[in-house]
Amino acid sequence: MDFKLTEEQQMLQETAERLVRDAYTFTKREHASKSEAGFSTEFWKQLGELGLTAIPFPEELGGFGGSGIENMLIMQELGKGICLEPFMESVILAGGLITQLGSEAQKEELLAGIASGELQAAVALDELHSHYDLSHVTTTATQQGSDWVLNGRKGVVIGGHTAGKILVSARNAGDTCDQQGISLFIVDPNSAGVTRRTYATVDGRKGCELFLDNAKGELLGTAGGAYDAISYQAGRAIAALCAEAVGAMRVLCDITLDYLKTRKQFGVVIGKFQVLQHRMVDMVSALERATSMAILAACLADDEDSAERSAKLSAAKFMVNRAARYVAEESIQLHGGIAMTWEYSGAHYAKRLVMISHQLGDDDHHLEAYAAQLSA
Amino acid sequence: MDIHFTPEQLAFRDEVREFLKQELPADIAAKVKLGKHMAKEDHERWQKILSAKGWYAPGWPVEHGGTDWGPVEKHIFDEESAAYGAPRLVPFGVNMVAPVIIKFGSEEQKRHYLPRILSGEDWWCQGYSEPGAGSDLASLKTRAVRDGDHYIVNGQKTWTTLGQHANWIFCLVRTDPEAQQQRGISFLLIDMATPGITVRPIYTLDGDHEVNEVFFDDVKVPVENLVGEENKGWTCAKYLLTHERTGLAGIGASKAAMRHLKRVATKQQKNGKPLIEDTLFRTQIAEVEMELMAAEMSTLRIVAAASEGGVPGAESSILKVQGTEIRQAITNLLRKALGPYALPFLPEELDYEYDGDVLLEDYSPALASSYFNMRKLSIFGGSNEIQKNIVSKMILEL
Ligand SMILES: Cc1cc2nc3c(=O)[nH]c(=O)nc-3n(C[C@H](O)[C@H](O)[C@H](O)COP(=O)(O)OP(=O)(O)OC[C@H]3O[C@@H](n4cnc5c(N)ncnc54)[C@H](O)[C@@H]3O)c2cc1C
């Protein structure tokens, strides 16, 4: 057992930390959030230039062969800056799916771009009524000659509005919630039959709805057999989200603690009120629990698929979702009115923290997943 | 002991329901139920309808245009109004400054201000909080210096709810900086059109413009705008705060929100079934509903005691904490009900007139925003921590 980082990992962390610290002021974030892309294309470029987008890819594909730990280190720093860039979506999730399922030709075509940041990809798994169930797929895929044709609507595709490629889950066989019969397709969002409705998200990012009307898709992996890979890669993405949440929680705890030490009411700093001291302690202890679970998730993320890995990743997401909401709500409450304002950075941390639970499963979803595999 | 309304009270409830059915404009009710933006004009329209019926200011004495309703009738009216989707009355005029004027104001002030509140001519806002004076309201610094038959006011108020619509503001100002904190404060009525007043918007975390900063720069206020005695404003403030707190439990609104939650959970799906049939989600609704039941019974107990002449004391603080926590729990479930669709931020769809494509459902765009917005409930009107301080001091004598 060893919880220490290697020298390379420390360097990676410092690189990411420095980059975020320099590039991400509150004003710059606001500006990027309101821009057409909804994130900083310049920062995205820097992530590529510094090699951060290449970290998780195997060396033979131009990457650094990073594991869940490296992803965690990067995601934590991105969380500290509540960075808007679709790093998890493009690099970890889309990149992971292509690495796992892609043909040599597909890997060659796409991974170098994703790893360098030149290609930003997105993943479309959710649907109107899927409510986090990745096997709930009604979008259809039918084969016409050598082509696959997709029909349906995918929802809340974060980063989908700017993506060069979108990976879409669609069904070529089976019933709505069958795990069998789900395939993944590479879709060019600018091709015929694809329309997008772009919108901002509550946490200041952007995403889109994806409408597929006889759109062409290029099969990734085998027809009807994508579910296991989707579920596995979603697990890696969950670990990444846990790390991001921990980064954001850490900063929000710091902001709140700082406020307790400076805001005066009744002639004393409000941190002198014991009730607030205990609440702050509870926030920090939620952060500690979440940190532990994010580390657990990071250590398992790249392990071989197993029921135990899935269950523990669910446990991590459950605990982190809960802690994230707790820290978000308490930070607002302990601040009073000021944290209710758009101008206050803490409010944006709170929003991102709550919204993390709406990506890849809320606490109910993961509680049920964990409970389902309990044994006496 | 009997928890049922009397036949007279039931008849009254029917009368209220009939009125709401007939008179509450459908578009306003729809906006309230779906959490769409309410325009100033919507509030004014509903206010005029209530005024015409003589029901805008039930709490006022009859001679000023109020009603002879007892606490039970008032409670029934509030409950039914919320159930039918009537907008919550903007309280600053009718339920805040008016009771103070009625209790402490001069005859002249009553004659002047009260009819203008009833008619909707004046829109009031509340100028209590300052950047440095929130929970510790008595540390407020906005200065009013007597100069002949005027006060000259300098300073800043903040968090002024709907101040952008208001033409009058009631302020707590410091008139004696030498006196001990509470003793040097006065209650002043200020015309927002007076030169030297600037109103600046504060955008809340959900992107809404609901609160403001109000700056006073050598603002001349006639001495006759003082309510009660100079330096005795704290008495007015305390009187008003107790008034404010009883309504803050918001049980009627929570019951309406609970019905909304069930409606939403019937439409939203999980595992191919309506969310309301999902055991886990259903259990969470049940939990909040039982909490709400208890809070409602507590409210009724306070209402019943009040109709026997009892004065609600620190119990209203307990109820404020419970009521706001319940409302927040409901908004939490509403947000959760959307699943991934809590993420899209669609302020344009909150506009009732919006006629573009609806992304999900008419109810969906308000839910995540309102979850964040409703964090305010445990902060304003005396934060929940302050309420607990009151309970521990006043009831528990700790
Ligand atoms: C949306 C909104 C609308 C508002 N509308 C109005 C309005 O129209 N007019 C108006 O005048 N004001 C308004 N307010 C202001 C509101 O009354 C204040 O926000 C409230 O009094 C709290 O003050 P504060 O925000 O300065 O927080 P602070 O008083 O600084 O409190 C910060 C934290 O410290 C805690 N705390 C403070 N003192 C103690 C103590 N002694 N013991 C334990 N904990 C303590 C608080 O509970 C809170 O958690 C509004 C506020 C909001 C958010």
Image (cartoon, coloured by chain):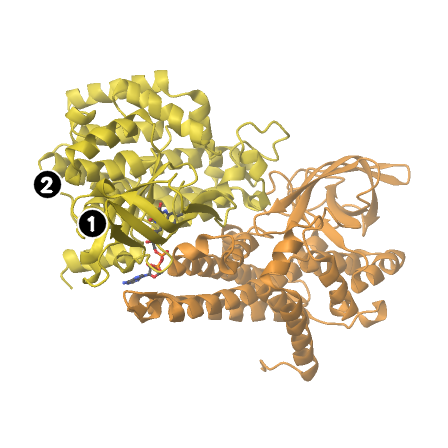
Question: Does residue B332 appear in this view?
Answer: no
Q: Is B315 displayed left or right of A56 in the figure?
A: left
Q: Mark 2 lies on which chain?
A: B
Q: Residue B160 appears at what percent x and percent y?
A: 38, 46
Badge 1 density bin: few <14, some 14–19, many ≥20, Cα 10 Å: many
Q: In which quarter of the image is residue A9?
A: bottom right
Against B230, residue A272 (above or below) is below
Secondary structure found at label 1? helix
Location of ligand 1 given as a quarter of the image: bottom left
Picture quarter with the N terminus of chain B: top left
Quadrant of the image containing the C terminus of chain B: bottom left
Quarter occupied by residue A238: bottom right
Looking at the rendered structure, the secondary structure element under dot 2 is loop
The answer to whether residue B90 is above or below residue A317 is: above
Q: Can residue B330 be seen in this view?
A: yes
Q: In screen coordinates, is B287 left or right of B71?
A: right
Q: Where is residue B96 in the image (x, y as percent from the top left)?
A: 26, 39
Q: Name the residue under label 2.
A: B310
Chain that the image shows in yellow:
B
Instruction: Residue type at mark 2: give it.
Output: Gly
**Residue lying at 55% horizontally and 44% vertically, measured from the top left:** B342
Residue identified by numbered label 1: B233
Residue at the spot x=35%, y=60% of the render?
Answer: B132
The disc label shown at residue A61, or none: none
Front in this rendered view, residue B40 or B34: B40
Residue closer to the observer: B218 or B142: B218
